[in-house]
Amino acid sequence: MSFLFDTGITRRNFTLGAMLVMTAACNTDAQSRAPVRDAFWRTWRDLYLKPDGRVVDTGNNGVSHSEGQSYGLLFAYKAGDAEAFEKIAGWTQSHLSRPDMALHAWRYDPSAPNPVADQNNATDGDLVIAWALAMAGQRWNRADYTARAAQIRSAVRSRCVIERHGRQLLLPGIQGFVNGDEVTLNLSYFAWPALDAFAKADGQQVWSRVISDSEAITRLSRFGPHRLPTDWVVINAPNQVAPARDKPPRFGFDAIRVPLYAALGGRQSLVPDIAAYWRGCLSANKPIPAWVDVVTGEEANYALSAGGAAVVGRLLGSAQPSALTNDYYAASLQMLARYQ
């Protein structure tokens, strides 16, 4: 499949695209044909990847997301599994790519009459898809991957970044996050390794403000006695960030990725309070709760999943769970925490 994208209303299949794919098939390196030795990847692939390349969220009625497709691409790339990568990329392009811009619908529900009725994107999924495609294009000499990655980067920069309150803000999606002067953000969508790769590919001048302002927003988002970020925040004035009013003010299942991406992107300095909170729990021989309400101080009466525990291990440099769990999101966090 070619990933050349028409910036008009429809996708086109160019003869050049077919030639690129044929050439790429001949040039795929020996690593892609070798047995995949990563046991974690093989388990994740067997549990969550359909033969056609669809990644299934087994904890959410079998739907799929651009997030899950992006994870599958990243994990397949890391494992050197070119065949799985191509299937995931092909399914993503065929089923989630928007006809009007180089972004992806965020959700696919196979049980619905229109599986992609909501065409809004999820920016974190687009970021990681573009990052993985660019790396795979270089490794496996796939010009179509490289071209598609560039198109997605350009669409994210032009459609998902706005100027407000003296900052360039990376929106969670193109619709539904701006209400007058108030902008809703999700800090866990700041996938630092992807953004750093974009700056290298496109030039620092294109992404430097987005990156530095996202770092500043992350530093400002420290709430409650433990100074923890929440899953969703709002900014409504310069340097004024607060927990989103229409969401539980929790350091929870989204925000767990804030320290994860900070660790993956070499930005542990963005999350010292999270590290201190987790170290305090461990020192007191107390299970780390799955979420914390930063307003009331209430904590979940159950511990972090294996995925959350893997994030703790990655941030603190401690041991991670030795086996992959059978929950899609937790297993994906485990896979991300192992990423080097």
Image (cartoon, rainbow, N blue to C red):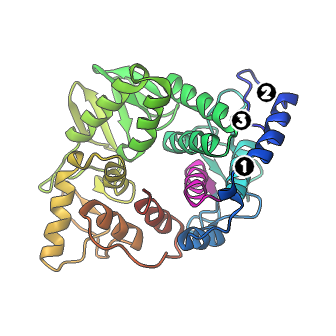
- Residue of label 3: 144
Name the residue located 28 percent from the left edge and 19 percent from the top edge: 166
- Quarter holding residue 13: top right
- Residue of label 2: 10
Can you tell which of label 1 and label 2 is closer to the viewer?
1
Q: Can the viewer see residue 297?
A: no
Q: Earlier in the sequence, mark 1 or mark 2?
A: 2
Q: Earlier in the sequence, mark 3 or mark 2?
A: 2
- Residue of label 1: 28
Q: Residues within 10 Å of mark 1 (few under 14, many from 20)?
A: some
Is residue 260 or residue 18 the one in the foreground? 18
Is residue 217 or residue 209 the one in the foreground? 209
Indicate yes or no whether the magenta region holds residue 129. Answer: no
Q: Can the viewer see residue 112?
A: yes
Can you tell which of label 3 and label 1 is closer to the viewer?
1
Q: Secondary structure at mark 3?
A: helix
Q: Residues within 10 Å of mark 2 (few under 14, many from 20)?
A: few
Residue 201 in the image: x percent, y percent? 50, 29
Magenta highlight range: 64-81
- Residue 78 placement, left or right of 336: right
Q: List the single residue furthest toward the right.
A: 15
Distance between the alpha carbons at the discs numbered 1 and 2 = 29 Å
Q: Secondary structure at mark 2?
A: loop
Residue 284 in the image: x percent, y percent? 12, 77
Which quadrant would the N terminus be assigned to in this image? top right
Indicate yes or no whether the magenta region holds residue 72. Answer: yes
